[in-house]
Image (spheres, rainbow, N blue to C red):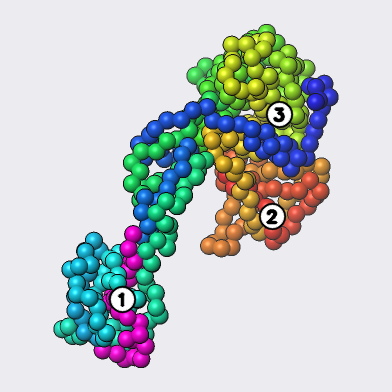
């Protein structure tokens, strides 16, 4: 176990794997029953099964005629129309289908038992109760068989699924007006720095407004956690220690600033007084190199009031430069917040796009550069947005992704395929 005095700087991949490994041990704290609408974006805490076959009857997917495919093998063919079924109609309203007969049918209606296909209306012409059929149809065409999308009792949604609009629709389709979701984990957000003042305080000429607590809170929210913003900690050991102890009342602690090599970067030192175990104290990335990941034991010393079932609580010390804070949250904090929210592990969403303008980088660190993904339809192009470095919040606002440049690349040419991390 490295102490704060022996830096352990990992590659991006090793650092991410380590976080993912620890995230696997994290569990959400509780559950609650919510109405389906309130459950949007929450994480399911129960399995949801099909209450009947889906579809419950063979479903017509086109407007047209329910027929026996054999009757229209040779076209043109003539059929007699003996009835009509619209969506929602009962099948006993139509006579049983005999050879050379057809039943008019609408999309979403149940296909009669003796029919084995639906002819699209476009391929027929009708006069009175007869149709002339211009095209043959294969058995099963334009019909979804009963149970084809799911059988009664099938598992449709697993615990750990984030309830996006499709999952909400699936829950609604099986009659779930209420669902059990995981309680949200509390994530402490502690910004540090003597120069930092809160947004509603007029800053002095050398002061900087606290933006990290706000970006982090928004990121915690988006990842499925409940942010708890603590007062700004000065670069002073006692008050910092006090606020850290308070922060560890939460399920996870995110600290911004104070993790670089400066004389007043006290975060690691103060975490060490809480018997912190450090898994890494840096990653070979830019922005975000001085990222710190570790955990403190619960139920002892300053954390005595925090009991509960957890043996450890995790923390991330995120570098204070705003872009570094944002990037390191996405790369390292998100899996921990998601795990505490009860979500199944989510991979980072990398895609590839053609580089629009060549990029020059120094070697040694993997870059996550604010970039803009654009292009017409499938021709995705990406371009670095101009930026003044890790403090340039507006550059991230102008971007819609991060361009990933491997640590060994000095120059990446226009037209090359590059990796893009979506955000
Ligand atoms: P640090 O990681 O503490 O060395 O901070 C690096 C730089 O990030 C500082 O000089 C500040 O300009 C900026 N910074 C640190 N904390 C915050 C914050 N909470 N909000 C906005 N900027 C910050
Ligand atoms: Mg600082």
What is the quadrant of residue 326 in the picture?
top right
Disc 2, SS: strand
Q: Which residues are magenta?
A: 56-78
As drawn, the residue found furthest toward the right would be: 6
Where does label 3 land, which residue? 293
Q: Is residue 384 left or right of residue 203?
A: right
Where does label 2 land, which residue? 418
Q: Is residue 97 left or right of residue 356?
A: left
Q: Is residue 325 above or below residue 413?
A: above
Of 95 and 165, the residue lying toward us: 95
Q: Is residue 43 above or below residue 299?
A: below
Gap between marks 2 and 3 measured at Cα: 28 Å
Quadrant of the frame with the N terminus: top right
First in sequence: mark 2 vs mark 3: 3
Q: Is residue 206 left or right of residue 39?
A: right
First in sequence: mark 3 vs mark 1: 1
Label of residue 419 in the image = none
Residue 389 in view: no
Gap between marks 3 and 1 measured at Cα: 64 Å
What is the quadrant of residue 15 in the picture?
top right
Q: Residue at x 38, y 67 (%)?
A: 145
Of 138 and 6, the residue lying toward us: 138
Counting from the top left corner in percent of width and height, residue 191 is at 61, 21
Where does label 1 land, which residue? 115
């Amino acid at each position: 176990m490295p102490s704060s005095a022996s830096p352990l700087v990992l590659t991006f991949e090793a650092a991410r794997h380590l976080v993912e490994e620890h995230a696997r041990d994290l569990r959400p704290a509780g559950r609650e029953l919510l109405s389906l609408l309130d459950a949007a974006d929450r994480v399911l805490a129960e399995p949801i099964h099909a209450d009947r076959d889906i579809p419950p009857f063979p479903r017509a997917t086109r407007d047209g005629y329910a027929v026996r495919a054999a009757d229209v093998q040779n076209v043109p063919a003539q059929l007699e129309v003996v009835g009509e079924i619209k969506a929602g109609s009962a099948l006993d309203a139509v006579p049983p289908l005999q050879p050379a007969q057809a039943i008019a049918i609408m999309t979403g209606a149940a296909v009669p038992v003796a029919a084995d296909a639906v002819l699209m209306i476009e391929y027929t012409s009708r006069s009175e109760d007869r149709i002339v059929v211009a095209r043959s149809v294969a058995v099963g065409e334009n019909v979804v068989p009963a149970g084809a999308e799911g059988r009664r009792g099938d598992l449709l949604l697993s615990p750990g699924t984030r309830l996006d609009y499709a999952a909400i629709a699936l829950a609604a389709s099986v009659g779930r007006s209420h669902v059990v979701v995981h309680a949200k984990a509390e994530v402490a957000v502690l910004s540090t720095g003597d120069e930092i003042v809160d947004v509603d305080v007029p800053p002095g000429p050398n002061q900087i407004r606290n933006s990290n607590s706000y970006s982090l809170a928004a990121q915690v929210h988006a990842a499925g956690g409940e942010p708890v913003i603590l007062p700004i900690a000065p670069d002073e050991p006692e008050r910092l220690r006090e606020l850290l102890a308070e922060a560890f009342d939460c399920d996870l602690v995110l600290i911004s600033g104070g993790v670089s090599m400066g004389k007043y970067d006290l975060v690691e030192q103060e975490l060490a007084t809480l018997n912190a175990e450090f898994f890494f104290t840096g990653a070979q990335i830019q922005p975000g190199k001085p990222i710190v990941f570790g955990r403190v034991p619960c139920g002892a010393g300053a954390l005595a009031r925090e009991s509960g079932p957890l043996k450890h609580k995790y923390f991330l010390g995120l570098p204070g430069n705003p872009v570094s804070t944002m990037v390191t949250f996405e790369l390292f904090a998100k899996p921990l917040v998601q795990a505490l929210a009860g979500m199944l592990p989510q991979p980072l969403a990398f895609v590839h796009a053609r580089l629009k303008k060549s990029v020059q980088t120094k070697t040694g660190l993997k870059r996550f550069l604010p970039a803009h993904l654009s292009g017409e339809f499938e021709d995705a192009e990406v371009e670095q947005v101009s930026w003044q470095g890790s403090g340039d919040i507006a550059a991230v606002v102008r971007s819609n992704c991060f361009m990933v440049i491997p640590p060994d690349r000095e120059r990446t040419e226009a037209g090359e395929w590059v990796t893009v991390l979506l955000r």
